[in-house]
Image (cartoon, grey):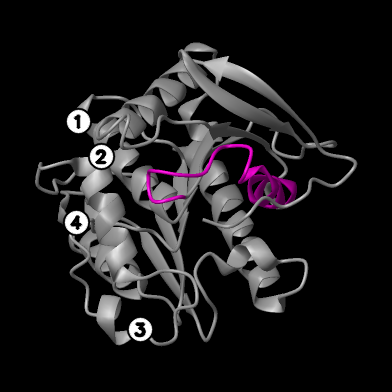
Amino acid sequence: MISSIPLPDDISSKRDELGGVPVVTVEIPGTEEEGAVVLYLHGGAYAIGSAADSVGLAADVCRRVGARAVSVDYRLAPEHPFPAALDDAVAVYRALLDDGVPHTKIAIVGESAGGGLAVATLVALANAGLPQPSSAVVFSPWADLTVSGASATGKADVDPVLTAEALRIRARDYLGDAPATPLSSPVLADLAGVAPLLIQVGSHEILLDDAVRLASRAADCDVPVELQVWPQVPHVFQAFAAMLDDADRALLAAAVFIKRNCWLADTR
């Protein structure tokens, strides 16, 4: 999880509720994509963090897209274990549809655990027979709660943010004694039919292998997928767009992906 980024003066946020779930709504002046919504899922290994903590990064995405953001304050483990976070994400998505937002105008974006949750949400929507959003973008996704990827040890010396031991503790908080499943670890999921997916990850993080395996899984299931590995940058480096050129370029690439897929979804 990345600490909170201050909001620019011209961007406003307010606490709200959708589908019985608390959210933070971020309004962007001069929205280009009329009616478009970024459904944002924060990081924090399912146990810490909040919508407010990640609202700055959500706003950075939405400014570039020209959309409003709805950042979900999903319930946290260990008090609320799996599938509480997933249920909350799906409930907010359903509420957006019920409010008249076309699924073609929704993009799901998530960071870290929120990235894994974003893909799990796509799978849950497919299982429920709900329409997919126009696209999903995930930053440094935690997509394997078994923490079995080769980079968990191979990148340990260069990752300044995460450790495999800490992730395993948080995985136990979230799953309890239950095994990892496709809805908690989407590297295990059948991704057939889910929305187009953009995966961004830094080469200096222990979750590199999660991103690579998730992209491979999506490709194997015939999902339109793009994997971008940015060299020598850490976990959720996109949060440092104000000082890191690669982070700014990554957010611009994410915005291009979202806008392109919104347009393509409108033409289907």
Q: Amino acid at mark 3?
A: Lys
| Residue 202 in the figure: left or right of residue 155 | right
x, y (%) of residue 27?
75, 32
According to the picture, the residue beneath numbered tag 2 turns out to be 123
x, y (%) of residue 11?
82, 38
Of the numbered discs in the image, which one, if any, rests on residue 221?
4
* 182 drawn magenta: no
Q: CA distance from mark 4 to mark 2?
A: 12 Å
Of the numbered discs in the image, which one, if any, rests on residue 51?
none
Nearer to us: label 4 or label 2: 2
| Res. 193 visible in picture | no
- At 25% from the left edge and 39% from the top edge, which residue is drawn? 123
Place residue 203 in its image quadrant: bottom left
Q: Amino acid at mark 2?
A: Val
Q: CA distance from mark 3 to mark 4?
A: 28 Å
- Mark 4 or mark 1: whose residue is earlier in sequence: 1
Q: Secondary structure at mark 2?
A: helix
- Mark 3 or mark 1: whose residue is earlier in sequence: 1
Image vertical order of residue 82 relative to residue 259, above or below: above
**Residues at discs 1 and 2 in contact (Cβ within 8 Å):** yes
Q: CA distance from mark 1 to mark 2?
A: 6 Å
According to the picture, the residue beneath numbered tag 1 turns out to be 127
**Residues at discs 4 and 2 in contact (Cβ within 8 Å):** no
x, y (%) of residue 142?
34, 58
Nearer to us: label 3 or label 2: 3
- Mark 3 or mark 4: whose residue is earlier in sequence: 3
**Residues at discs 3 and 4 in contact (Cβ within 8 Å):** no
According to the picture, the residue beneath numbered tag 3 turns out to be 155
| Residue 60 in the figure: left or right of residue 154 | right
Q: Are there few (<14), some (14-19), or many (20+) residues within 10 Å of tag 4?
A: some
